[in-house]
Amino acid sequence: QSALAQARDLRAGVARLGGFGQIDFRLERTGEGGGGGGGGGGGGGGGGGGGGGEAGGEDPSRCITRRRADGSEGWRRIEVTPPSLSLKPTAAPPPPLSPSEAEGGYLCDRLPPPVAIDYSTPLIEELKERRKAIRNKACHNELDLDVIVEHWKWFQEQSDKLDVQCHDLSVRSKRLLIRHRRGTAYSNQVAGLEKEREDYNANIRALRADKEWIEGTSAWRHIIKLTREHIVTTKSGEVFTTEELRQDEEEFGSFEEYVKRNGLR
């Protein structure tokens, strides 16, 4: 498969990706007593001791504070979705290509140092191993477009899995909140859900860092150069190369001629 075809496939895959960000939902003890602001969601922005003060600064529409009538401790659920993670190439123009890159060579002679990740999940450990392999290929001048495309496809797969996990965690947190409102204790489940949330957010941070890291490679810059110069995306999301369009026009004539020939006007 040619480099241009790989770039086209990658561009199509990037165009289909949806954005997502870290999620932050917690079931926390609100403490005893304490006057929140107007019950319900008002506790999120309320002042005055107890859980109301704890939730200050959160968006009241995204916070739920529950207290029992006798003033004993309850739970509040906070769900925050920060700005989405854009998986499309950065809007800023890439740095100028070196002479060798301009001639079509896109070996990655200089890789930016990866951001240190001080958290461990299976995905993060796999990501570290993949980065190590990429750096080794770069040191031996073996890092080409195929390696970057393969890594980006893996990145897409992990992104899709995390998107599904985000929905699952959100649903489970809502169910757990309903059970707490019924007065049943589920502390162990809360702790387990908290751990899953922390792992999820750590994975999102790691993929964000990897996105920034991989976009610093000259192979990625070569992909961007190819897509800007040789790839056309239609409004319906279809992706064509300028060479394909040229060949179609030579074989079938222009679109206007096709319309006239088939009486579509």
Image (cartoon, rainbow, N blue to C red):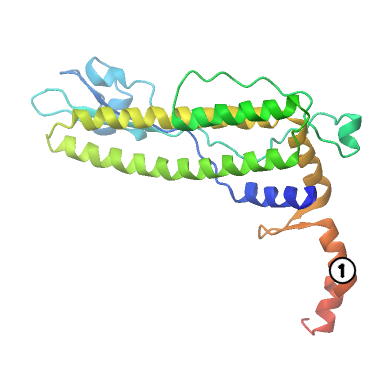
Which SS class for mark 1? helix
Q: Nearer the viewer, residue 68 or 239?
A: 239
- Amino acid found under the numbered disc labelled 1: Glu
Q: Residues within 10 Å of mark 1 (few under 14, many from 20)?
A: some
Q: Residue 78, position in %: x, y?
A: 33, 30
- Across the whole image, how many numbered discs are drawn on residues? 1
Q: Residue 208, position in %: x, y?
A: 57, 30
Q: Nearer the viewer, residue 104 or 231?
A: 104
The answer to which image quadrant residue 93 occupies is top right
The answer to which image quadrant residue 89 occupies is top right
| Residue lying at 85% horizontally and 58% vertically, measured from the top left | 243
The residue beneath circle 1 is: 249
| Residue lying at 30% horizontally and 32% vertically, measured from the top left | 193
Q: Nearer the viewer, residue 171 or 151?
A: 151
| Residue lying at 78% horizontally and 47% vertically, measured from the top left | 3
149 lies left or right of 65: right
| Residue lying at 14% horizontally and 31% vertically, measured from the top left | 185
